[in-house]
Amino acid sequence: MLLRLLLRILALAVIIGLTAAIVPGIHVHGGVGWLVVVAIVFAVVNAVLGPVFILFGLPLIVLTFGAFLFVVNALLLAITAGLSDHLDVDNVGSALLGGLLITIGRLLVGRLWRRDRPQWASRRGVQGRDVQVWWAWW
């Protein structure tokens, strides 16, 4: 469990580092060690404030079929930049693009690290026969 947490923090650090490399208005100062610290701060901000923002933004999330979640990630990224001296977000556009890239990156990492079911899971079909399915997101 601790190993999984460390791997997720490292993956988030890589995602934030790639986002900072791609988006011109996002800068991470201090090297790889501080990038991991920024990822930890982002994870804590996401754990504490993320559910509150998702709850308040739920009508917009439903109306946009989940696309509003990248705005929530942009807001969390801006809050993380405000709390950390090693992350700078220059403007709202950079925060929105960074939020979009972090959302996509976390989605891809989440799809790679499924923990509930194996890649090929058996599920009962309509007529009682086992059906092999390749997705595990239901």
Image: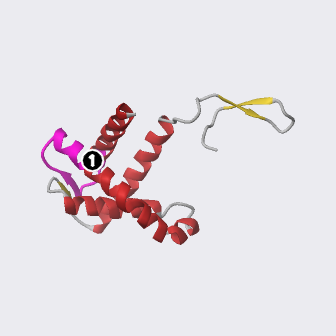
Residue 57 image point, x, y percent: 47, 69
Residue at 12%, 45% in the rendered image = 30
- Please, is residue 18 above or below residue 117 in the view? below
Question: Is 78 part of what is drawn in magenta?
Answer: no
- Quadrant of image for the N terminus: top left
Quadrant in which the C terminus is drawn:
top right
Camera-nearest residue between 76 and 2: 2
Q: Is residue 28 magenta?
A: yes
Question: What residue span does the magenta drawing correspond to?
Answer: 18-38
- Residue at (40% x, 56% y) in the render: 100
- Counting from the top left corner in percent of width and height, residue 113 is at 47, 35
Q: Residue lying furthest front in this view?
A: 1
Q: Toward which corner of the image does residue 78 lie, by quadrant?
A: bottom left
Seen in the picture, residue 62 relative to 47 is either above or below; the reply is below
Residue 55 drawn at (x, y percent): 48, 67
Q: Which residue is mark 1?
A: 40
Residue at position x 50%, y 61% in the image: 67
Q: Eyeballing the image, is 6 above or below 65? A: above
